[in-house]
Image (cartoon, rainbow, N blue to C red):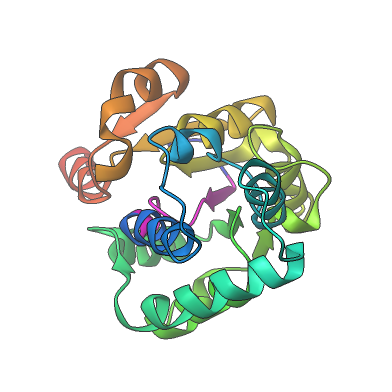
Amino acid sequence: MLEEKKAVIFDLDGTLVDSMWMWKSIDIEFLGSRGLACPEDLQKEIEGMSFSETAFYFKERFRLKESLEEIKAVWTDMSIEKYRNEVWLKPGAGDFLKYITERGLKTGIATSNGRQMVDAVIDSLNIGQYFQVVATSCEVTYGKPAPDIYLKVAEELSVSPAQCLVFEDVPAGILAGKRAGMTVCAIDDEFSREMEEEKRQLADYFIYDYHQILKRKVEIS
């Protein structure tokens, strides 16, 4: 999957770091503190939305009195300590980042999350040195499944979309990468396991963890 590729672009939550569990618990706590139940369809409804788009969705659907900035500030406060202390890289991700860096591939992050939280987890895991570009969907017109965020990262890396390999964990993100004209590898995540068949159909490749890629490289060499 790395043949003729010059850049690798990662989604963050559920793809590079094991953090999707955290967001469901935050949604339940956030809504519960306002006397609201967390709907079963919520996670699927907000899949791929930027941080700002998600805040707007919450405000409209749940008729919240807070402003969008106030909603985002609450979420940031609720999540930032978890990102710093309870979120880890997905299995094999650290070794894979080292591998592609040693091969001279450019790397970027294209995430729907807010910048403060992205910076917190990158700093806590000490992986900032691996990425030339880190961008959030709040910096583009439309969040995933629109291709905007992936096209932005490719442009900033000075690499054509066809030369980019994307890693994603949910259908909306996979679609964003494909619509950007990139090759996409879907990765397993507990949060989206019930979507595995859809992910396999949408993506060019599917892996359970990054060790699979590294093991394959050893076998070939």
The percent position of residue 196, horizontal first and vertical second, equals: 30, 26
* Location of the N terminus (image quadrant): top left
Q: Position of residue 206 (x, y in %)?
A: 32, 30
The quadrant in which the C terminus is found is: top left
Question: Could one spot residue 21 in this view of the protein?
Answer: yes
Toward which corner of the image does residue 194 lie, by quadrant?
Answer: top left
Q: Position of residue 182 (x, y in %)?
A: 61, 32
Total labels: the figure holds 0
Q: Nearer the viewer, residue 30 or 52?
A: 30
Q: Is residue 209 magenta?
A: no
- Is residue 101 shown left or right of residue 73? left
Could you say which quadrant of the image residue 22 lies in?
bottom left
Tell me if residue 14 is in the magenta stretch. Answer: yes
Q: Which residues are magenta?
A: 6-20
Q: Position of residue 100 (x, y in %)?
A: 43, 58
For the point 21% across and 43% down, the residue is: 212
